[in-house]
Amino acid sequence: MAVYKTVQREILLDFLKARKNEAFTVREIAYELSRRGDLEKIPSESTVYRLLKDLEKNGSVQKDINPENREFVYRLTENHGKGVSMRCRVCGNVYSVDNETSRRLQADIAGVGDIVPDGDIEFIVECRNCKHRPEEQNN
Ligand SMILES: [Zn+2]
């Protein structure tokens, strides 16, 4: 389940990146994705909604209201890709990192080997909830 969530999150981000000057409702995004023939599993509207909420939390996506019909629309933020986020490998939840920490991490990573961060940094972690699940304990 977490794997699906990760894949679908990438699909959603790719979609928004490809059309970054436009804003979409949840329904429009789900519809556009459903028209693609190459997806193994098409995200439902509720999945799209949950993913957008995660992306909004980590600053990748911003939510606006369409003044004409009062519907929420989502778009990629201006500074998308300049943040750092933490994603739990078990449940797929995304946790944001504050700006100061984010800047420091970016600076640190820039000095490692031949790596040139393009700004979109994601750490794979195990969140507290998952770590404390009895069956998941491995240290
Ligand atoms: Zn977790």
Image (tube, rainbow, N blue to C red):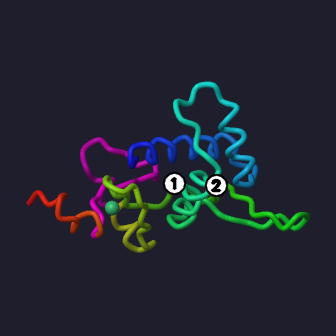
* Neighbourhood count class around disc 1 (C-alpha, 10 Å): few under 14, some 14–19, many 20 upward: some
Q: Which residue is mark 2?
A: 76
Image quarter for ligand 1 equals bottom left
Image height of 92 relative to 16, above or below: below
SS state under label 2: strand
Question: Residue lying furthest top in this view?
Answer: 37
User: Which residue is rendered at x = 56% and y = 59% of the image?
Assistant: 50
User: Which residue is rendered at x = 74% and y = 66% of the image?
Assistant: 64
Magenta extent = 108-128
* Neighbourhood count class around disc 2 (C-alpha, 10 Å): few under 14, some 14–19, many 20 upward: many
Q: In this image, 16 relative to 90: left or right?
A: right
Can you tell which quarter of the image residue 4 is in? top left
Residue 75 percent location from the top left of the image = 68, 55
Which is more toward the observer, 57 or 42? 42
Which is more toward the observer, 9 or 136? 136
Q: Is mark 1 within 8 Å of ligand 1?
A: no
Q: CA distance from mark 2 to mark 1?
A: 10 Å
Residue 47 percent location from the top left of the image = 57, 52
In magenta stretch: residue 111: yes
Image height of 31 relative to 48, above or below: above
Image height of 98 relative to 122, above or below: below
SS state under label 1: loop
Question: Residue lying furthest left in this view?
Answer: 139
Q: Which residue is mark 1?
A: 81
User: Which residue is rendered at x = 46% and y = 53% of the image?
Assistant: 119
